[in-house]
Image (cartoon, rainbow, N blue to C red):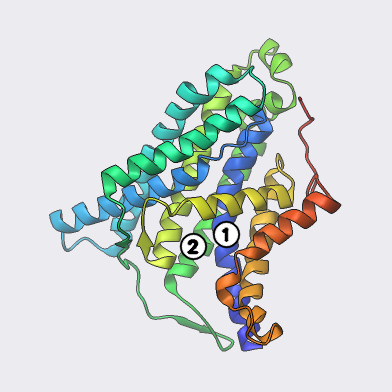
Amino acid sequence: MEVLLQQIINGLVLGSMYALVALGYTMVYGIIGLINFAHGDVLMVGALTSWTIITWAREASPDLPGWALLALAALISMVVCAVLNFSIEKLAYKPLRNSPRLAPLITAIGMSILLQTLAMIIWKPNPKSYPTLLPSEPFNLGGAVISPTQVTILATTAIVLSLLMFIVNRTNLGRAMRATAENPRVAALMGIKPDVVISATFVIGAMLAAIAGIMWASNYGTVQHSMGFMPGLKAFVAAVFGGIGNLAGAVVGGVALGLIESLGAGYLGPLTGGFLGSQYSDIFAFIVLAIVLTLRPSGLLGERVADRA
């Protein structure tokens, strides 16, 4: 029972990070029908930027509390990622908005490779240790343990998701986003500026990715130029699993995928007699993707946005 509870805690933490990244995928897809495969690399830029800020701030103010360092790094990383994603949309995606869907998809893959290469040049290819800024003494929860970092990840995710849902459902920007997703031409006739809405969507998605990148780095304790590839790919699976184009589906898909992966990693070895260990946990994301695409291509909660193909 203790092992099960521990794996559930680990799965919720992992799923929270997937959910934040999956929201960026599903928001962009819901409005312009683009799978932004460079989104995982925005997570990487956020994590590496936060590492740089923390390193500089520690040298400049050694007595600054860990939570203050983390908050400062998060704020600056969100701004950097927002500017980056805004620029990517304007320079790489906007000129191809009316092109066949294959063109922006190839461009997104190219942007992913470009961001990884630039990050490797700027930060060098070697992995870097991410500092532990929060207390390390874990809490005991029914025999399982949860670290202050994991508690912070869960709490931050809940706050961020609540704020995002409020923006989408209760604000003028959210109404404009929903209208643009339904029909951008009609939305434009109603006085909404689709270009502004699309840019705002990319900016919000980038800020979520930056937060997820800091969470990922804090949880695993390391950063490098290629760290965004696998989380980005799994977050895409989570978005498809939940129903890409559906915000609630992205959250459900992210949490569900995190739980499946964590439980699989905990029980895969015993169930296979040691033939497959926890290092094979990545296969669950792609097994889930294959099953969902076969049985329910629209995902668990379906797709709210009409196909504009």
Distance of label 2 from label 1 (alpha carbons) = 8 Å
Q: Nearer the viewer, residue 179 or 25?
A: 25
Of all residues, the one furthest to the front in this rendering is: 275
Task: Tell me the kind of residue under disc 2.
Answer: Ile
Quadrant containing the C terminus in the rendered view: top right
Q: Is residue 107 visible?
A: yes
Specify few, some or many for label 1: CA neighbours under 10 Å numbering under 14, 14-19, or 20 or more. many
Tell me where residue 83 sits by quadrant.
Answer: top left
Question: Contact, CB < 8 Å: mark 2 with mark 1?
Answer: yes
Numbered mark located on residue 66 in the image:
none
What residue is shown with label 1? Answer: 16
Quadrant containing the N terminus in the rendered view: bottom right
Q: Nearer the viewer, residue 84 or 72?
A: 84
Is tag 2's residue or tag 1's residue first in the polypeptide sequence? 1
Task: Tell me the kind of residue under disc 1.
Answer: Ser
The image position of residue 127, as x and y in percent, is 32, 60
150 on left or right of 117 = right
What residue is shown with label 2? Answer: 153
Instruction: Give the residue displayed 58% in from the left and 50% down from the top.
Output: 233
Element under disc 2: helix
Specify few, some or many for label 2: CA neighbours under 10 Å numbering under 14, 14-19, or 20 or more. many
Instruction: Give the residue displayed 67% in from the left and 38% down from the top.
Output: 169
The image position of residue 95, as x and y in percent, is 53, 17
